[in-house]
Image: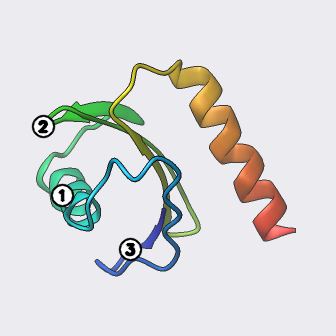
Amino acid sequence: MVIPSLPETVIAYTVRKEMTKETYSYFYRYVNSIQSITPFFTFEGINYIYVKKLGIYFVATTMHNVMPASSIELIERIINVSIN
């Protein structure tokens, strides 16, 4: 999912159909309510992995355990491909 600094989802792609549309708004509200947040966090049983570049949140969500470093690397590669 790609979210600009405003609370609007630009691109959303679901693979396992395990997330609802409210997941996007939960992420945005949670990130804006906390001053210091890590790029990988769990909120209400959902793992959020995100990178913010150029004022846009690039976010991956899952209910399964994943390796944070691999997930962030995947997001970074997607960013590089989309920017170039």
How packed is label 1: few (under 14 Cα within 10 Å), some, or many (20 or more)?
few
Q: Position of residue 11 (x, y in %)?
A: 52, 74
How packed is label 3: few (under 14 Cα within 10 Å), some, or many (20 or more)?
few
Q: What is the quadrant of residue 82 in the picture?
A: bottom right
Mark sitting on residue 44: 2
Q: Are marks 3 and 2 in contact (CB under 8 Å)?
A: no
Give the mark toward the camera: 1 or 3.
1
Q: List the residue tagged with mark 3.
A: 5
Q: Are marks 2 and 1 in contact (CB under 8 Å)?
A: yes
* Amino acid type, label 1: Tyr
**Residue in the image at 53% along x and 18% along y:** 67
* Camera-nearest residue between 84 and 60: 60
Q: List the residue tagged with mark 1.
A: 26
Q: Earlier in the sequence, mark 1 or mark 3?
A: 3
* Camera-nearest residue between 47 and 39: 47
Q: Position of residue 74 (x, y in %)?
A: 69, 39
**Residue in the image at 26% along x and 60% along y:** 20
Find the distance from the CA under tag 3 to the CA under tag 2: 22 Å
How packed is label 2: few (under 14 Cα within 10 Å), some, or many (20 or more)?
few
